Amino acid sequence: MIQVYATQIPSKALRSQFAGFTAILPEAYRKRIAGFLREADALRTIFGLLLLRRIIYDRTGTVPENMNIEPGEYGKPFLPDFSELHFNISHSGEWVVCAVSNMPVGIDVEEIKPVDMQVAETVFALGELDKFKSIRDAEKLDAFYDLWTLKESCMKAAGKGLYMEPAGFCLEWPGEKINLKKSGLNFFRCGFADGYKLAVCGEEESISPDVIFVSDTECRAW
């Protein structure tokens, strides 16, 4: 069963407060965190990895001394020391989320903000676009993020991210049951937080109905 975890980044946190944790990260992650110009971007990466470390403990009973994370063929991270644990991280606004599964999984969270609807012409397939255009204007923003999070979670579950052209595949959408023909993938929407959309895609056929919220204090404790 797929499980989703979430943590909220505290408003006054600074990356310098996490020097002890970042020291156990692979060099590529240390350089990435140090290189961010915006503190918020660095903190999203740090809290994503803190959350992952907590999840590893929850699932295996082991607190990793070193966060050994390697990129897959298209850059999707995996845990060589815990090969049975598939995970995917997403962040937006003040939230960081992580989906975990025994099989490949993808997750996307987006803070709902105004968007130029012409973007839909470039990221939605023709079949999706026809349905999107039929939706009332008052509901279009919500529908845009509903479909986009589903598509991005699919691209991440496939392990290709933006190497996979978003307009190159068409979801059977809208509706309660989302489908991508002959893919073997399952799609889920998760109730999460006001002002956000969250979607999960994976090979497992079920998902826990409850998001596990982990406080920033709990993240730092592991």
Image (tube, grey):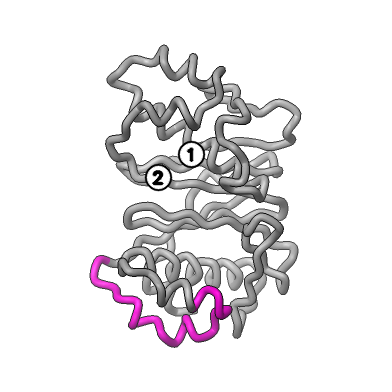
The residue drawn where x is 59% and y is 26% is: 171
Horizontal and vertical percent position of residue 188: 56, 37
> Would you say 196 lies left or right of 75 here?
left
> Would you say 67 lies left or right of 121 here?
right
Q: Earlier in the sequence, mark 2 or mark 1?
A: 2
Q: Amino acid at mark 2?
A: Glu
Rendered view: 19 above or below 174: below
**Residue ID for mark 2:** 110
Secondary structure character of the magenta stretch overall: helix
Horizontal and vertical percent position of residue 40: 32, 65
Horizontal and vertical percent position of residue 55: 56, 66
Q: In terms of depth relative to the viewer, which is nearer, 71 or 86?
A: 71
Horizontal and vertical percent position of residue 142: 36, 30
Do the CB atoms of the residues marked 2 and 1 lie less than 8 Å apart? Answer: yes
The residue drawn where x is 54% and y is 22% is: 173
Q: In terms of depth relative to the viewer, which is nearer, 209 or 148?
A: 148
Is residue 181 highlighted in magenta? no
**Residue at mark 2 to residue at mark 1: CA–CA distance:** 7 Å
Q: Which residues are magenta?
A: 11-30
Q: Quadrant of residue 64?
A: bottom right
